């Protein structure tokens, strides 16, 4: 997963991931666990007007909402730590954090209702099984919220069944403020 890097730090105590990092990791895990020909996971809906070239099954990831977590960081970032800056002796690094609750949907498309239902169930079990791994990689939380009413998507040759799973993913953003950089910017902007 995409993680925060603190150059010069002997150990990374600030592991976090973005939604993009989560989706990229999920894609790699699905390909490894289900094989490269299982279907595809993406963020863009395929063009369903050409039924011959639609790759199925398909899972489409969609961010529905992203709001600050009311308990962890209601309206602003939270101060976490101050560390000596290993790149600039005599200066410090401030670490700030903010948590977001992201409501996400996984739309599971397949050729038949049964296949769509099977794919949705298989994905839910997979996400539940690997939730601990995603947390180790920096996702703060991953909770199943429910499954929406089955739908059908129109395509040239008829309609395509889709099942939608809703999840809450809590992501954390870590902000690193280098004292040296702040000082340089202040000096630069203060010059006439």
Image (tube, grey):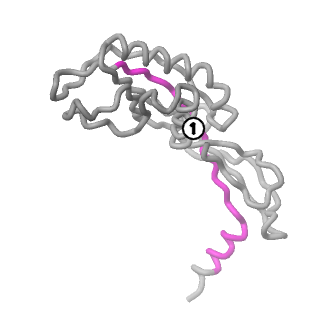
Vertical arrangement, residue 138 with respect to residue 183, above or below = above
Vertical arrangement, residue 67 with respect to residue 114, above or below = below
The residue at 77%/45% (across/down) is 13
Q: Quadrant of residue 15?
A: top right
Tell whether 110 sits left or right of 12. left
Numbered range of the magenta stretch: 163-187
The one nearer the camera, 19 or 56, is 56
Q: Taking the image as drawn, is residue 1 in sight?
A: yes
The location of residue 114, given as percent across then percent down, is: 35, 10
Tell whether 95 sits left or right of 116. right
Q: Taking the image as drawn, is residue 70 in sight?
A: no
Badge 1 crowding class, 10 Å Cα cut-off, few under 14, some 14 to 19, many 20 or more, is some
Secondary structure beneath label 1: helix
The residue at 51%/37% (across/down) is 23
The residue at 44%/22% (across/down) is 166
The one nearer the camera, 178 or 47, is 47
| Magenta stretch: includes residue 177 | yes
Q: Quadrant of the C terminus?
A: bottom right
* Most common secondary structure along the magenta stretch: strand
């Amino acid at each position: 997963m995409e993680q925060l890097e603190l150059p010069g730090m002997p150990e990374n105590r600030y592991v976090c991931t973005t939604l993009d990092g989560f989706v990229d990791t999920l894609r790699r895990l699905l390909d490894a666990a289900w094989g490269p020909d299982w279907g595809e996971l993406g963020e863009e809906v395929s063009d369903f007007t050409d039924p011959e070239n639609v790759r199925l099954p398909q899972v489409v990831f969609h961010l529905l909402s992203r709001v600050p977590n009311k308990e962890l960081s209601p309206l602003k970032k939270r101060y976490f730590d101050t560390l000596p800056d290993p790149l600039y002796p005599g200066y410090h690094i401030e670490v700030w954090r903010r948590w977001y609750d992201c409501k996400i949907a996984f739309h599971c498309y397949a050729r038949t209702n049964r296949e769509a239902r099977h794919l949705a169930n298989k994905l839910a079990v997979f996400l539940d099984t690997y939730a601990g791994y995603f947390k180790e990689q920096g996702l703060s939380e991953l909770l199943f919220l429910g499954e929406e009413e089955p739908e059908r998507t129109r395509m040239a040759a008829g309609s395509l069944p889709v099942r939608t799973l809703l999840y809450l993913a809590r992501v954390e953003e870590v902000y690193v403020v280098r004292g040296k950089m702040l000082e340089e910017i202040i000096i630069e902007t203060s010059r006439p």
